Amino acid sequence: MMVGIGIGTELSLNGTAAYAFAHILYKSLLFMATGAVLYRTGTIKATDLGGVYRSMPLTAFFCAIGALSISTPLTGGFVSKSMVLDAVAHEHLGFVWLTLLFASAGVFLCSGIKIVYFAFFSRDAGHRVEEAPASMLVALGIAALSCIFLGSFPKAFYAILPYPVDFEPYTIPHVVSQLQLLLFSALAFALLLLSGIYPAEIRAINLDADLIYRKGGRLFYTTVAAGLNGLNRVTEKVFIGGLIGGLSKLARHGPANFLLFFIEPYWKLIGLEGRERDEVRDKLYQQIEAGVLPVGLMGFFAMIYFGLLFLL
């Protein structure tokens, strides 16, 4: 599809749009089929599957149609992919054409043959389950019929493309070359399996670009978490424990200390000192904290307040 957009001719853009449409259908069919297998068996790992076609023959059949729809004649993948290949050939891009041809074989091998073989055939993993629910089978059937309809009636398919289409997919060169490609891909896969050269499916983690964000993401999270948690502790100690705590103490004890600051000179004037002054001071402090003040004291401060107000 990216090559078709890059070429930019009407034929390549039509092929790109057509293949995008067909790709959505057959890939949805493959995903729904494997989803049905996951629903019944509880796993989708190739190492844990095999022999499921005995219990889910209809699902296996629809999945095979999805795999064949990648580029097999009488399917949507064939009538759309051929347009892109022809557009590349018309531009005399031989290397690109060969690259797409080999890529087509690779996609058919990986997304087509391997999915169907390892999920439904291969060794018998002992799964004895029911067929997919009727709702799933209906959805699979609709998608499978859509794939075949597009390939069987390409003119109706081409009618919805952005540019007028003057292209005939079912020519002898198109059909023969595509069948050769697919059959030899299947033959190579079978020979490699029978000879034991094909690598076995093993329980492992495929190393890919996701390793960067899986490992790097964990390191980034650990580093950021340590930094932010440290900053949070320092902030809590300075602001919450220090500044906020100081303001809280000031709001709680400030009024009492403020009043005592002004009343202590009066005690000195009347000769109140020593232990007696401390007892009076503690009692008054508790009364101020509790918000209960003697009437005389309140009158004394009212006098000071109105005196200052009169003077200022």
Image: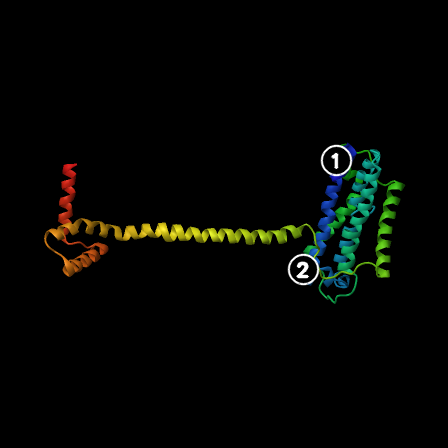
Image height of 262 relative to 47, above or below: above
Q: Nearer the viewer, residue 35 or 231?
A: 231
Q: Position of residue 196 (x, y in %)?
A: 84, 61
Q: Residue at x 66, y 51 (%)?
A: 210
Q: Is residue 25 left or right of residue 262?
A: right
Q: Position of residue 151 (x, y in %)?
A: 80, 44
Q: Residue at x 82, y 44 (%)?
A: 101
Image height of 81 relative to 290, above or below: above
Q: Earlier in the sequence, mark 1 or mark 2?
A: 1
Q: Residue at x 65, y 50 (%)?
A: 212
| Residue type, numbered disc 2 | Tyr
Disc 1 from disc 2: Cα separation: 40 Å
Q: Residue 309's mark? A: none
Q: How is this picture coloured?
A: rainbow
The kind of secondary structure element at disc 1 is helix
Q: Which residue is mark 1?
A: 6
The kind of secondary structure element at disc 2 is helix
Q: Furthest residue to the left?
A: 270
| Residue type, numbered disc 1 | Gly
Residue 144 at least partly seen: yes
Say few, some or many: other residues with alpha carbon within 10 Å of mark 2 (under 14 / 14 to 19 / 20 or more).
few
Q: Which residue is mark 2?
A: 39
Q: Position of residue 75 (x, y in %)?
A: 80, 46
Residue 160 at least partly seen: no
Q: Nearer the viewer, residue 242 or 198?
A: 242
Q: Is residue 293 left or right of residue 40?
A: left
Q: Nearer the viewer, residue 90 or 197?
A: 197
Q: Position of residue 88 (x, y in %)?
A: 81, 36
Image height of 67 relative to 96, above or below: below
